[in-house]
Image (tube, grey):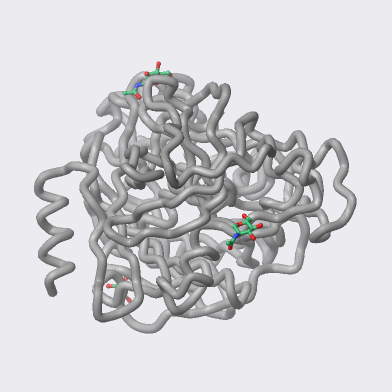
Amino acid sequence: MLSQAFVALLLATDVLATPLVQRNKPLITVPIARRVNATSARDLLKIDQARAKAFKNKPAAQPHHGTVSAAAATFGIPITNEAVNYAMTVGVGSPATTFSLLVDTGSSNTWVGADQANPFVVTSTSQDTGNLVAMLGEEFLDQLTLGDVVIENQSLGAALFSEGFSGVDGIIGLGPTDLTCGTLFPDEGDCIPTVTDNAFSQGLISEDIVGISFAPTTSLSDTNGEITFGGVDASKFTGDILFVPITSTSPSSEFVGIDQSITYGAAKTPILSSTSGITDTGTTLLLIASDALATYESVTGAVPDEDTGLLRLTPAQFSSLESLLFTIGGTSFEFTPNAQIWPRALNTAIGGTDDFVYLIVGDLGTDSGSGMDFINGMTFLERFYTVFDSGNSQFGIALSPSTNSTSN
Ligand SMILES: *[C@@H]1O[C@H](CO)[C@@H](O)[C@H](O)[C@H]1NC(C)=O
Ligand SMILES: *[C@@H]1O[C@H](CO)[C@@H](O)[C@H](O)[C@H]1NC(C)=O
Ligand SMILES: *[C@@H]1O[C@H](CO)[C@@H](O)[C@H](O)[C@H]1NC(C)=O
């Protein structure tokens, strides 16, 4: 109850505030702020597509302590979406320097100092390992503070150089540990425990999992999300959580990858037959393979809009838009018409007008059959409670109070 009141207060004050720690349960719960940058929001689709391409071009995961190719060592941090970002506050060192970090399940290294005005500061707790990290930074082991929980000996990259970041200081990588393998130089054979791994191994949380809660918003800036390290927040979902194994299909298997199929409307028109893809907090839109998107366009009547780069409908077409049904692990999840659209109150922020309704379903840029045929980005994750259970290599999904929201 205290936690709900606290989160409500955060929502009301709309700030990136200090995390809340639940003492009775070994969980660490941290609020997340969503920010839309109106100057770069016109490039939403382009940025998401560039990120998708980088995921697909990433060299395959390296075996632990094996030989690592130069290509793997040069894979940096995935492209981040400057237009819409989700960030949490962490402290590093003692006394702590405070950083606002992008919450990213599509990468697993944690690094700071992207904003040269707020660099990494060496303190008495900082230990320089002498390694370089692939995003072109220096590796330090240091303490990381989430609220008043201190995680020791966390590997952090201190950026020497960065581009494409604005308003944030770096990334907290929540993805699978294997994504860190081969990211150090010269210790190329090493993999790096993630923040979640360290919190777990240090007994600060009782399970190596993160629970992720986001909600749709009509504000440019809103602290309407929450990450729970070590468990789930029962106040943020309804019914049971369905768990499915991380997919075995590469390259989706290297990320928080799942198998799903998608149909449209009461007629259950197939949009995407059962295939692999990923869920990703660093992608804004719901991207589907080009051939699947063509079917979606033909059943909805949506047309490409030059001003926003997104698909658009007239208000009349929108009134007859039907739900998409996602089938995951044999269970159907309804993605309502309202879930398929960009919040209309923010149309002008992406270069659109009030005359149209813009769709958040976009083109992945490649046809199906690639091993990564969809990316369920934030606009999908806003409608469900999700769990990345790294310890058991599984993904969980449940309905949430936002599933049927009509706020967009
Ligand atoms: C600290 O973490 C590094 C890897 O990130 C590991 O090699 C080292 O053994 C750890 N030290 C302690 C004291 O746990
Ligand atoms: C918004 O994005 C532009 C680049 O597209 C950047 O120059 C600007 O600093 C960003 N604004 C904020 C508040 O992050
Ligand atoms: C959403 O609405 C559907 C009916 O369209 C209903 O079956 C479902 O239970 C609702 N979900 C939630 C979480 O309220």
In the picture shown, does residue 43 fall above or below 140?
Answer: above
Asked if residue 271 can be seen in this view, the reply is: no
Q: Residue at x 29, y 41 (%)?
A: 343
Which residue is situated farthest in the front direction here? 124
Q: Report the side of 80 relative to 213 (left or right).
A: right
The answer to whether 383 is drawn above or below residue 80 in the figure is below
Q: Is residue 354 left or right of residue 174?
A: left
Rendered location of residue 312, percent (x, y)? 42, 34
Q: In the picture provided, is 273 more to the left or to the right than 47?
A: right
Along the line of sight, the residue nearer the viewer: 211 or 207: 207
Above or below for 237 versus 48: below
Q: Residue furthest bottom?
A: 240
Write the residue at 40% across / 74% down.
Answer: 231
Give the residue displayed 48% in from the left and 79% down from the top. Answer: 242
Q: Camera-side residue: 25 or 12? A: 25
Image location (x, y in percent) of residue 289:
66, 47
Relative to the observer, which residue lies in front, 251 or 159? 159
x and y, in percent, of residue 281 in the image: 47, 50
Would you identify the image quadrant in which residue 70 lies? top right
Please tell me which residue is depicted at 43% across the width and 79% down the height of the picture. 241
Rendering quadrant holding ligand 1: bottom right
Q: Is residue 30 visible?
A: yes
Numbered label tally: 0
Q: Where in the figure is residue 314, as x and y percent of width and height?
A: 35, 35
Looking at the rendered image, the quarter that the N terminus falls into is bottom left
The image quarter containing residue 3 is bottom left
